[in-house]
Amino acid sequence: MSQPALLGDAELVRRCRAGEPEAWNALVERFSRYVYAICTQGFRLSEADAEDVYQEVFTRVYTRLDTLRDDAAIRPWIAQLTRRLCIDSRAARAREQPAAEPIEREREQVLSDLDEAFVVREALAELPEHCQEMLDRFFARDESYRTISSELDLPLGTIASRIARCLGKLREKLEGRSEASDPSSV
Amino acid sequence: MAHDYDPERLGELLGLLCPAPEGWARAAQELPFARSSLDQIVARAEADAEFRTALIADLEAVLEQNGVDPEPRLVDALRRRLPEA
């Protein structure tokens, strides 16, 4: 298995450290949505502030990858880095124009949901290409049945059932994962 | 932690991770190249007084002449790293 997009986190980090451009591209691709969501949903940053934080996160990841002690822990490391930069950004903005802070409990719930969403996306990446595309278009890109039907050249009447089937596969994949990681299930 | 992945919950979770706006990931992916260009320009500015003066006078123009897109983030980063004139 050598395609960077299919590598586990630890191997991907190792290859980034070795200077492989494709590994870096895959790393950005893997965490892009997650970093963006922490900025905009967890901390409700404006689009401009979110972009600054987003780029700063990846700059620091790139320049400080050598300081990561456990390569497999890249996701929590990126999450922590993003949170810190979001807090700094909000503090700087609050000095200029004080705004209502999201309630801490509410924020923690959003961040925890985002962690769960990341796990779901990892499982999605293991599904057949057509399922990945179908579910991503409908749920993450908010495309209508009509758009999906026309873009993928599929009969309109089959979209709902295809989505349901792909969700079923995704659920099986996730249940398989949690059984594999739960020692009481063997 | 046990999760109940019913279709509705799965849909909600999939909807949480939307793509970042167009161009953000591309800019982050180009970081290593931008950084390498930056290192070369700083090294040249440290070694060549004439180049350093021209660079400080008009950063954007010198970057363009050297085939580097003078996007604001890169210009700011370069300004911070430049030796004093």
Image: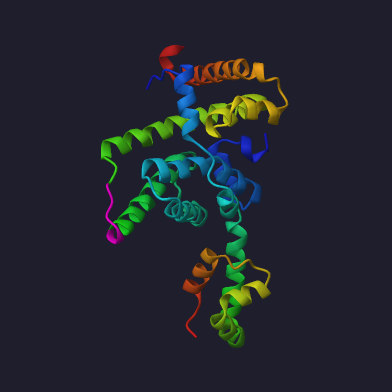
* Farthest-out residue, front: A146
Q: Position of residue A177 (x, y in %)?
A: 50, 21
Q: In which quadrant is the N terminus of chain A drawn?
A: top right
In this orientation, does residue A128 appear? Answer: no
- Picture mark count: 0
Q: Nearer the viewer, residue A164 or A57?
A: A164
- Relative to residue A89, is residue B33 drawn left or right? right
Residue A99 shown in magenta: yes
Q: Residue at x 64, y 68 (%)?
A: B68
Q: Quadrant of residue A155?
A: top right
Give the magenta part as a residue range. A95-100
Q: Nearer the viewer, residue A98 or A173?
A: A98
Q: Residue at x 58, y 87 (%)?
A: B49
Q: Quadrant of residue A96?
A: bottom left
Seen in the picture, residue A65 relative to A167 is either above or below; the reply is: below
Q: Position of residue A21 (x, y in %)?
A: 64, 51
Q: Position of residue B30 (x, y in %)?
A: 61, 56
Seen in the picture, residue A118 relative to B10 is either above or below; the reply is: below
* Farthest-out residue, right: A153
Q: Residue at x 54, y 16 (%)?
A: A172
